[in-house]
Image (cartoon, rainbow, N blue to C red):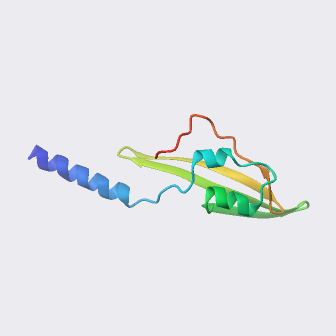
Amino acid sequence: MKYKMKLVVLLVSMLITSCVPQTNFKWDSARALKAGMTRQEIIERMGPPNQITVQNTAEGLKETYIWFYITYDLFGTNSKSVSAVLLNGKVISVPTVPDSYKDND
């Protein structure tokens, strides 16, 4: 009976974790973002952002591209995010990514 219960728990856990969205970028890609890059360059490197905010400012069009890094395990979720700020289509602010952030390959 205990064997069957363990098997059921394992199968349910596998089902739950296989149904969640996967992270679409690598931490090394985020570390490689540089001021002056174009919108196209950062999307090629990072993939499409999970969220974009847009604001008209006196300097021009300001966009913030945000990517979420989400991992799942049996104990819950762990999420982090990085963002790049663009002004008139060029990156003006990039994330600082700690060396401790590793990809789960």
Image x and y of residue 79, in percent: 52, 47
Left or right of 7: which side holds 90?
A: right
Residue appearing at x 50%, y 50% in the figure:
70
Left or right of 17: which side holds 83?
A: right
**Quadrant of residue 49 within the rendered picture:** bottom right
**Quadrant of residue 57 within the rendered picture:** bottom right
Residue appearing at x 65%, y 48% in the figure:
30
| Nearer to me, 91 or 8 | 91
Residue appearing at x 73%, y 57% in the figure:
64
Image x and y of residue 40, in percent: 72, 63
Left or right of 100: which side holds 44?
A: right
Image x and y of residue 84, in percent: 72, 53
Image x and y of residue 3, in percent: 12, 45
| Nearer to me, 58 or 24 | 24
| Number of marks drawn | 0
| Nearer to me, 55 or 34 | 34
